[in-house]
Every structure is written in structure tokens, then in C-alpha cells.
Image (cartoon, helix red, strand yellow):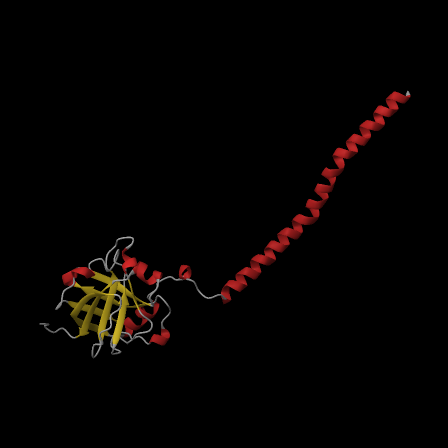
Amino acid sequence: MDNNNKHKTKKNNTLAQLFVAPFVFVLIALVVIVPMFIGGFSFAKTYVNKARESFTMSYGDLVPNDKVYAKHLKKGEKIDKKELEVAGKVGELSCDNAAIGCDVYYGINRASKRYGVAASAKSGLFGDGGEIRIDGDVSSEFKALKNVKKGDVFTVNAPEGEYKYTVVDVTTAQEYTKKLSGEYLLLSTEVSSDAFAHQAGQRLFVAATIGAEEVE
């Protein structure tokens, strides 16, 4: 073999090494790194799942349920607030004159109002006395609340029985400041379904005191 052929062969071997070496390095890296990555991912997934168990439940995690309601309905017993979970069913609300009929869930939040109307956790339940604040969306269950008039009667079906409430006040305001005596419902919703209605800061309030009585 002459010197030119030897030089070409050596050059070709050098070029081959230059191209092959990086690929070999990448393959070795993949063999080492990929198992570590998979193991690290599995560890991170396990850690995240454990961490989620201790995180505060978000609205996206809430699912309305009637477990407590159904249990007490079967026995005809009143619900104790201590037993309730957020978005747990507490009753059924209706008003024939305004064509309203919906479930009432515990706690004012999007989940409760998505499936019915929401009873404030800061007020009592039916039969507890005092104010029972219930909020609903004007685009869904409370779209007919604007048709309610004084003298209309709301009926609430709770596990222990039926309650009647007579409408004594219908008003639009930023806040409802009147203090009524005895037990009463304070129903509220947006004034209209217009996208910018909330900017006016006004809400529709309907107050109904317990008992089916005539109102002047």
C-alpha cells in the first residue's frame, strides 16, 4: 500500500470516529438518564398525589351530593350543620307563582349554584330561626325570581318536613339592610343576566317570613 492510500485510510478512520463518537455518547447518556428520569417522574407523581391530599379543596373539586339529606329524609330527622359537607343538599325550594323549583345546597359557591341554589354557611338552616340567606344565578335557577311579588309563598322541603315562607319584601339594592323578626328567607340574585350587570353593584333581594299568611 502506498503512502497516499495509507493517508486516505487514516483520514477516513478519523472522520468516522468524529461522527460515531457523539452518537455513542448520546446512546450512553440515554441509557443512564432515561431510567433516572422515569424513576424521578414516578417519585414526583407519588409526592404530588400525597401533597394533594393535604391541600385545601378548590371549587373545581366540589361535587354536590345528597348523602346527608337522603339519610335524614329516610328517618324524617332534621339535619345538623356539623354533618354537612360543602355543597351538600339541605332542601328543595319552590314557588309556584314564579315557576321556581330547585335543590338547595350548603355553602355559597359555584358548585352549589351550578346544580341549584346556595344556602350561606353563615346563616342557619330551615327551622333554626333567624335569617336564611340563599343565593342563586339569574341565568339559571333564579331567572324567574324577578317575577316574585309580595304575598307569593315559597315552599321548602327539608328532611324533617315542609316549611312555608310568605314574601314580604322585594327590592333592589347593593345590600339588604332590613332586619326582620323571626325566621325568614333572604333570596338574592343578579339584577339581570347582562354581562356587565354586576358592575352596577345592585342585586335583587326577596325576603319571605315563615308562615303562609296574607300580606297587605
Quadrant housing the C terminus: bottom left
Location of residue 62 in the rendering, given as x and y in whole percent from the top left corner: 39, 62
The answer to whether residue 82 of the structure is visible from this angle is yes
Location of residue 120 in the rendering, given as x and y in whole percent from the top left corner: 31, 70
* 182 sits left or right of 32 in the view: left
The answer to whether residue 159 of the structure is visible from this angle is no
Give the farthest residue toward the right: 2
* 13 sits left or right of 87 in the view: right
Location of residue 104 in the rendering, given as x and y in whole percent from the top left corner: 28, 66
Using the image, determine if residue 109 lies above or below residue 39. below
Depth order, front residue of 33/166: 166
* Residue at the (34%, 70%) spot, across then down: 68
* Residue at the (50%, 63%) spot, across then down: 52
Give the farthest residue toward the front: 200
Quadrant of the image occupied by residue 95: bottom left
Quadrant of the image occupied by residue 199: bottom left
Depth order, front residue of 66/14: 14
Quadrant housing the N terminus: top right
